[in-house]
Image: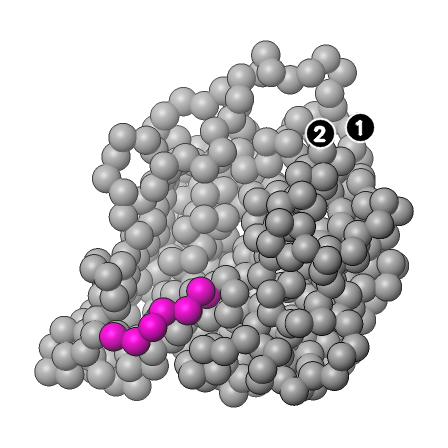
Amino acid sequence: MVPYRMMDLKNLPVPARRDLLKAGALAVPAILRGAPDSKPIKVGLVGCGGRGTGAASQALKADDYAELTAVADIDPARIASSLDSLRKVAGPKVKVEEANRFTGLDAYKKVLASGVDVVLLATPPGFRPGHLRAAIEAGKHVFCEKPIAVDAPGVRSVLESAKLAKEKNVSLVSGFCWRYANQIRATMERVRGGDIGNVVAYYATYYTSPVKPMPPASERSAGMSDIEWQIRNWYNFNWLSGDGLVEQAIHSVDKVAWVMGDVPPESCVATGGRQIPAHAGNIYDHFQVNYLYPNGVRAFLGCRQIPGCHNENSDYILGANGHALIGRGPSPRILGPKKWSFEGQKYDMYQAEHDALFASIRKGQLINDGVWMATSTMLGIMGRMAAYTGQQISWNDALNSQQKLGPDPIDWNGSFTPEPMALPGVTKFV
């Protein structure tokens, strides 16, 4: 295998998002910007949980002629609940016939074969590289939730899919929603433009409560397979979620990557562990990561998911001539000689990413977020690797890791014992 190197990412073209997503363009619905014809855009949803239902709602609002025609999930009850919710907000645009409600681990293939034009991928992240590859190979435009993988082999697969998307002339829009928030875009333009001088350090926080606590084993139904039990409690297993750093705090990691121009760091060290005992699962509940960038620039990330603790989701961007703050107050701001605060209207970043996707389809000006969303995801995975092993991990070593966390293939009725919770200094880098 030819290894992926830092230059593989740095030398790729700047994504088209910078041309398509000017701050003012986010102010109006895509339907008004794209001058579309009346041809319907058929949408398929893969993963009918809360995030998937939200994504489908936003997709249907993004274009007057968008219509939901196929859905997939492991649970028929969740499909029914999702469709009920979507009918309340989108009414007749929900056109999912009974025959197009697919269940099972192969249900995504049936959505792709149903005649849809756009696919929304919102299953647990462990499935995302395979689903994305299949969608792009089928020639579908894709909205791909974050993170895009849970291990390095998955990231490399996504990089290949992103390249294929360009060849297939389809859009690939990422669920890293802060990139589509107009107030954050305005802030980043000033930071990247030099308003605080050269960036010398970045401190990001993602301190919150547990997302999906693991239930006790007594709640597991008799005869339920290991795979089904783990998928139904996916957040608590790193082969499905990537761990809290990769699944949740990845938004903060992405903002770090954005400020650094999506150029990977040289290396990182990290700490982490499980402070509050859990019934099962193998994820940590806290991390601290220290990324080293060229010229001695450092980025620090702290994340925690423990109840009863200080909560904060903020970014402190320190420059030679000032600093920028995000999340500490009602609006982002810059303190220093070029003092500034965002004072415009804030637009829904979740809606904005779908507006951009559907406008790109109507205009034929395609978006490909693939490289930077893979870079951001890999940054999170790299930090997890450093915390799990207790070692300093280089970018090249992380990206070329051969460790695959989950089973292959995944059998709904199968047995699988995930790796035990990592022990720094004992767990080895693979």
User: Hey, what amino acid is under mark 1?
Assistant: Asn
Q: Based on the displayed image, in which of its 4 quarters is residue 407 positioned?
A: top right
Label 1 – label 2 distance at C-alpha: 7 Å
Tell me the element at label 2: helix
Number of the label disc, if any, that sits on residue 228: 2
User: In the picture shown, does residue 301 fall above or below 370?
Assistant: above
Q: Is residue 386 left or right of residue 372?
A: left
The location of residue 308, given as percent across then percent down, is 27, 30
Q: Give the total of numbered labels.
A: 2
- Tell me, yes or no, if residue 321 can be seen here: no
Q: Is residue 110 left or right of residue 340?
A: right
In the image, what residue occupies the spot 67% across and 59% down?
120
User: In the picture shown, does residue 180 fall above or below 386?
Assistant: below
Q: Based on the displayed image, in which of its 4 quarters is residue 239 positioned?
A: top right
Q: Is residue 17 left or right of residue 266?
A: right
- Tell me, yes or no, if residue 326 can be seen here: yes
Tell me the element at label 1: loop
The location of residue 103, given as percent across then percent down, is 80, 40
Residues 399 and 177: in front is: 177
Q: Which residues are magenta?
A: 343-349
User: Hey, what amino acid is under mark 2?
Assistant: Glu
In the image, what residue occupies the spot 70% across and 25% down?
226
Residue 347 within the segment the image draws in magenta? yes
Identify the mark nearer the N-term, 1 or 2.
Answer: 2
Query: Mark 1 = which residue?
Result: 413
The location of residue 161, given as percent across then percent down, is 71, 68
Pointer 1 with pointer 2, Cβ within 8 A = yes
In the image, what residue occupies the spot 10% across and 82% down?
337
Residue 62 within the segment the image draws in magenta? no
Number of residues whose C-alpha sits closer than 10 Å to that of mark 1, classed few (under 14), some (14–19) or many (20 or more): few
